[in-house]
Image (cartoon, rainbow, N blue to C red):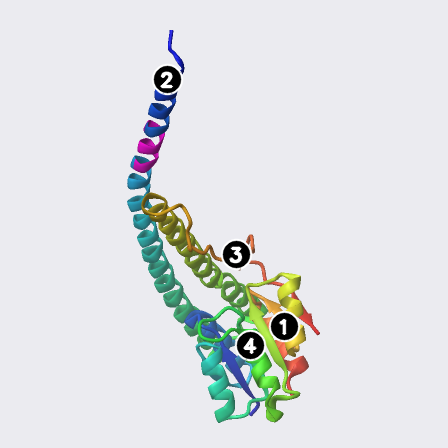
Amino acid sequence: MIGQTGLRRTSVGVFVEHVQSISQAIAVVGPQLRIAQSEIGRMRGIIDNAASELLISFGEIQSAVMQSEVAVGNTADAAIARAMTALQFQDMVAQMMSGLSQRIGAATEMLDGAVTSDGTSCATFPRQVVLQQDVAAGDIELF
Amino acid sequence: MLSILAVDDSPSIRQMVAFTLKSAGYSVIEASDGADGLAKAKEKTVNLVLTDQNMPLMDGITLVKNLRGMPSYATTPILILTTESSDDMKAKGRAAGATGWLVKPFDPVRLVEIVKKVIR
């Protein structure tokens, strides 16, 4: 049988083990979050670069279509307009990645703070600014 | 030629807006954020301002408020083109004096239609 003192010692032991395992988890998760943040930055760079190249190409195609003496009809114009609308995925994704990166940064700050301070944190999480689900053209409202 | 000030911190969106409006026969001045937009609006009075909302240094709604405080921009159409679609943000834009709210992504054909409708 375990007496009152023994029970207290066991509880304290379990608590200490929990704290140690949380600290170990934080030590592993923190660096992983920093890697994720860095990868988001690189993904954004690749997407920006690809979108910029595509934009230049579509611009050249549209200029060629406009200058062409051969009638290509409304189909080409409509296709280019659709492509220009869809290409704006880059702007939306860039904003979402920026928000995600800030969120991870704030979470990392909180984890660092949880190990070193009294548990309070001045980390601030960003507001969600992109709620779109697809690249369909958005609403227009004139006041 | 009627001139339009296009303000956006995204170079690709600025390129797309400029290309679309230039193809429709407008002269386009580009600015990379609200503060840059305000400086360029002071340099040359334009016929319409098209601005993003979320930008570094100065956001779109603050730019609208600043422009509405200038006599030369008291009645100039100002459109906000943004990914933001909440009623709360739209109400703030309207209160600041914006002429309209366009949610990204924009359709180039519809953008030209709206510009033609409101530009002076």
Q: Which mark is residue A5?
A: 2
Please say whether residue B88 is visible from this viewpoint: yes
**Over which residues does the magenta segment extend?**
A17-23
**Residue tagged by mark 3?**
A128
**Residue tagged by mark 1?**
B93
Q: Position of residue A45 (x, y in %)?
A: 34, 61
Mark 2: which amino acid? Thr
Of tags 1 and 2, the one toward the viewer is 2
Q: Are marks 1 and 2 on the same chain?
A: no
Q: Are marks 3 and 1 on the same chain?
A: no
Which chain letter goes with mark 4? Answer: B
Q: Are marks 4 and 1 on the same chain?
A: yes
View extreme (right): residue: A143
Question: From mark 2 to mark 3, how far is it between C-alphas?
Answer: 51 Å
Name above or below for residue B77 compared with residue A11: below
Mark 1: which amino acid? Gly
Q: A54 and A94: which one is in front?
A: A94
Drawn side of residue A73 relative to residue A115, left or right:
right
Give me the residue at 52% from left, 56% from top: A128
